[in-house]
Image (tube, rainbow, N blue to C red):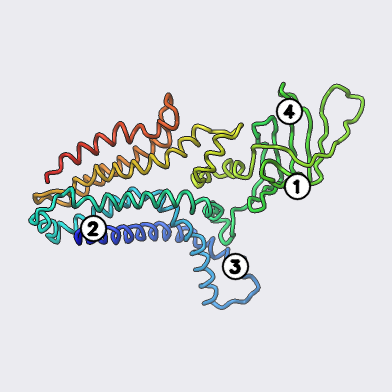
C-alpha cells in the first residue's frame, strides 16, 4: 500500500465516521425531542421514592437515553451503509479536487482507476463488516432493538398476548401472556384438529415453556372433543409436552415484523426448512438479500465514482447533485428489488435480478467512460 493509498483511505474513513455520526445523532435528537416526556416518565417510574437530586435525575435520564439509542447504532449501520459510503466518497474526492491534490496525482502519472482502488476496497471491507454485524450483533441486540418508547428502561421487549396463532400442525394456540425472555406462555389454550380439520381435543395448562422442539406443559391436560359419545363427559388426560413449529422466534416474528430482519442466516434457514412457516418466500429473499445488498452497494459505488474521477475542471456541486440522484435511485431500486422480488422467479434468484441485469451493466459502462 502506497502513501497515496493510505492518505485516500484515511480521508475516506474519517469522512465516513463523521457523516455516520452526524446522521445518527441528528436522527436520535429528533426522536428524543419528540419523546422526551417518555424518558422523563421512565426515570420517574424507576427512581420513584428515592429522593434523588436534580443532577442525579439528569444523569439517570441521560443514561436512559444512551441505553435506548446506543444499540441502534448497529441497526443504523445496517440500513444506511450504502448511502453513507457514497456520501463519504463524494466528500473525499471533492476535497482532493478543491485542494488541487487530484491535479498533483494526475501530474505524477497516476491513473484515476488507481485512485479509486483504495475506495473500492474500503467499501468492500465495510460491507463485509455489515455481514458480520447482521450475523452477530443484530441477533444479540434484537430484544433491545424491538423496544418502543413505552418500554424505555427495560432490558428486553415487553411480553404480549398470543391470539389464536396457528402452528402449521393442526393446532391453534392462545395464551394470556407470552414472555420472550423466559420463552414462556401463561395459561395456554391449544385446540388440536384431526386430518379432516375437525376439532379433536383441547389442551390446557398453567404454563408452557419452550423446550427446544416443543412446549413443555405445566399441569397440562388434554380433553377429547370427539362427538362419538355425547352422553358421557370426556375425561381429561395428562399431557407433558406438545411438538410445535410455533417457537418463540415465530411468535416474535408475528408480533414484530422488523424482528425477521434481525435474524442471522442460520435462523432464517431453520425457519425456511421448518414445516408450517408462513412467508417462506419472503424469508428466502431476506436470506439471499443479505448478499444481494452487498453487491448493490458495490455496484452503486462503481456507478457514482466517475462523477468525481474527472481530469478537467467541472462544477463539483452539479457533479455531487448528479451523484446523489444516481446513488439514491440505485439504492432504492435495489432495496425494492430485494424486498419484492420477481413473482415468476425463485426467491433466491429474484433478489439478484436488479443488481445483475441493471446495475452491473451500468456500473461497467460508467467505469469504462472514465478518462484516465
Q: Earlier in the sequence, mark 2 or mark 1?
A: 2
Q: Which residue is mark 1?
A: 207
Marks 1 and 4, how far apart at CA: 21 Å
Marks 2 and 4, how far apart at CA: 67 Å
Label 3 vs label 2, nearer the camera: 2
Q: Residue at x 43, y 36 (%)?
A: 339
Label 3: few (<14), some or many (≥20) within 10 Å? Answer: some
Q: Earlier in the sequence, mark 1 or mark 4?
A: 4
Q: Is the residue 328 above or below the residue 152 in the image?
A: above
Marks 3 and 1, how far apart at CA: 33 Å
Disc count in the image? Answer: 4
Q: Which residue is mark 4?
A: 193
Q: Which residue is mark 3?
A: 44
Q: Earlier in the sequence, mark 2 or mark 4?
A: 2
Q: Is the residue 107 above or below the residue 226 in the image?
A: below
Question: Which mark, by number, is residue 1?
Answer: 2
Q: Earlier in the sequence, mark 3 or mark 1?
A: 3
Could you say whether the residue bearing mark 3 is in a helix, strand or loop? helix
Q: Earlier in the sequence, mark 3 or mark 2?
A: 2
**Circles 3 and 4 in contact, beta carbons < 8 Å:** no
Label 2: few (<14), some or many (≥20) within 10 Å? Answer: few
**Circles 2 and 1 in contact, beta carbons < 8 Å:** no
Picture coordinates of residue 240 (x, y %)?
79, 42
**Circles 3 and 1 in contact, beta carbons < 8 Å:** no
Amino acid at each position: 500500500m502506497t502513501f497515496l493509498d493510505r492518505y485516500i483511505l484515511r480521508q475516506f474513513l474519517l469522512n465516513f465516521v463523521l457523516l455516520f455520526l452526524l446522521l445518527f445523532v441528528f436522527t436520535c435528537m429528533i426522536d428524543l425531542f419528540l419523546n422526551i416526556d417518555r424518558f422523563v416518565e421512565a426515570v420517574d417510574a424507576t427512581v420513584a421514592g428515592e429522593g434523588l437530586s436534580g443532577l442525579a435525575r439528569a444523569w439517570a435520564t441521560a443514561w436512559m437515553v444512551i441505553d435506548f439509542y446506543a444499540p441502534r447504532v448497529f441497526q443504523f449501520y445496517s440500513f444506511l451503509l450504502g448511502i453513507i459510503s457514497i456520501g463519504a466518497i463524494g466528500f473525499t474526492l471533492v476535497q482532493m479536487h478543491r485542494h488541487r491534490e487530484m491535479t498533483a496525482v494526475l501530474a505524477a502519472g497516476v491513473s484515476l482507476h488507481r485512485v479509486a482502488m483504495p475506495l473500492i476496497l474500503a467499501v468492500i471491507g465495510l460491507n463485509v463488516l455489515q455481514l458480520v454485524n447482521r450475523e452477530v450483533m443484530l441477533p444479540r441486540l434484537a430484544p433491545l432493538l424491538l423496544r418502543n418508547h413505552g418500554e424505555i428502561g427495560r432490558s428486553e421487549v415487553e411480553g404480549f398476548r398470543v391470539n389464536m396463532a396457528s402452528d402449521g400442525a393442526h393446532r391453534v394456540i392462545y395464551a394470556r401472556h407470552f414472555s420472550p425472555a423466559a420463552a414462556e406462555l401463561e395459561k395456554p389454550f391449544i385446540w388440536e384438529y384431526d386430518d379432516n380439520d375437525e376439532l379433536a381435543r383441547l389442551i390446557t395448562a398453567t404454563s408452557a415453556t419452550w423446550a427446544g422442539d416443543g412446549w413443555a406443559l405445566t399441569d397440562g391436560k388434554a380433553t377429547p372433543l370427539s362427538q362419538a359419545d355425547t352422553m358421557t363427559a370426556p375425561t381429561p388426560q395428562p399431557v407433558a409436552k406438545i411438538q410445535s413449529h410455533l417457537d418463540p422466534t415465530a411468535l416474535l416474528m408475528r408480533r414484530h415484523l422488523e424482528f425477521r430482519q434481525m435474524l442471522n442466516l442460520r435462523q432464517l434457514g431453520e425457519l425456511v426448512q421448518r414445516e408450517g412457516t408462513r412467508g417462506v418466500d419472503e424469508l428466502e429473499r431476506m436470506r439471499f438479500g443479505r448478499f444481494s445488498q452487498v453487491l448493490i452497494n458495490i455496484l452503486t459505488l462503481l456507478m457514482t465514482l466517475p462523477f468525481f474521477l474527472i481530469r478537467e475542471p467541472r462544477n463539483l456541486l452539479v457533479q455531487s447533485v448528479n451523484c446523489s440522484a444516481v446513488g439514491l435511485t440505485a439504492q432504492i431500486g435495489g432495496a425494492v428489488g430485494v424486498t419484492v422480488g420477481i413473482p415468476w422467479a425463485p426467491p433466491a434468484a429474484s433478489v439478484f435480478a436488479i443488481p445483475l441485469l441493471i446495475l452491473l451493466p451500468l456500473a461497467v459502462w460508467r467505469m469504462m467512460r472514465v478518462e484516465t
